[in-house]
Amino acid sequence: MNFHIMTLFPEMIEGAANTSILGRAIDKGLLSVNAVDIREYTANKHNRVDDYTYGGGAGMLMQAQPIYDCYMNLQPVREGRKVRTIYMTPQAKVFNQDMAREFAKEEDIVFLCGHYEGIDERVLEEIVTDYVSIGDYVLTGGELPALVCMDAIARMVPGVLGNEVSGETESFDDGLLEYPQYSRPEEWKGKRVPDVLLSGHHANIEKWRHEQSLCRTKERRPDLYEKYLATHEKL
Ligand code: ADE
């Protein structure tokens, strides 16, 4: 899977993408991350990529031309392939696990990261296929949101987490939060690992974990708990 990130700060993307699990997946050839500097495509002799907003209002807007030229030069676009192009913006539906799973089926994904007060609407109409937010708060740019989405999408790509783990066995796979987990030692600061986990009785362990997931979801995410009950427990 190939990620293409159009940004004014490619070093932000490169630093984060080359570490840990994403870095390993890139080394293994499962992923590629191509951060492209929009500024390199400006036709402005002073290297400007922003300008005032028609109609007035505070702040500057990213102009259409550099973004469009940058997009047209991306490899999958040059090759005439249709690519999902995601504009990171708080004016959109909020990203979730289902969306991560869906995007993970694509061969190429383009992220467009905005700055300043936003982007000229005309270039968005021309190239964007999906508008995605990471939550109801406003950040200074789209790079952190793009990294968040890229991480969540990448871990759903087969092989990225390694053969032994599947992205599907974690929180949200069935709409519940994950149960608590413990490692050695059996006792730490007077707190013991729950007996059932030491019992070796797999059915009891599964049952305990499911109950813990239910309790945790009810307490921390009552909205998810209600949804789970509505779909799973037809009484
Ligand atoms: N850009 C600025 N804030 C954002 C958010 N919450 N989600 C996605 N992109 C953004």
Image (cartoon, helix red, strand yellow):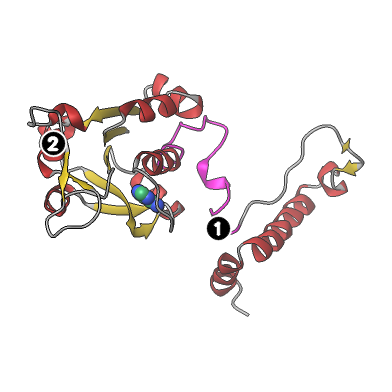
Q: Disc number at residue 40?
A: none
Query: Is any part of residue 102 visible from this angle?
Result: no
Magenta segment: does it hold 193?
no
Locate the C terminus by quadrant: bottom right
Q: How many marks?
A: 2
Label whose residue precedes the other's in the sequence (2 or 1):
2
**Residue at the image point whose x is 10% and y is 37% from the top:** 80
Locate the N terminus by quadrant: top left
Q: Which residue is mark 1?
A: 174
Q: Amino acid at mark 2?
A: Pro
Q: Is residue 123 above or below residue 212?
A: above
Q: On the rendered structure, is 1 left or right of 25?
A: left
Magenta segment: does it hold 170?
yes
Indicate the quadrant where residue 125 lies: bottom left
For ligand 1, tell me if the residue under mark 2 lies within 8 Å: no
Q: CA distance from mark 2 to mark 1?
A: 43 Å
Q: Is residue 62 above or below residue 56?
A: above
**Residue at the image point whose x is 72% and y is 48% from the top:** 180
Q: Position of residue 229 (x, y in %)?
A: 60, 72
Q: Which residue is mark 2?
A: 66
Indicate the quadrant where residue 25 lies: top left
Q: Amino acid at mark 1?
A: Asp
For ligand 1, tell me if the residue under mark 1 lies within 8 Å: no
Query: Is any part of residue 77 visible from this angle?
Result: yes
**Residue at the image point whose x is 30% and y is 34% from the top:** 3
Which callout, 2 or 1, points to the residue nearer the camera?
Answer: 2
> Which residues lie in the magenta part?
153-176
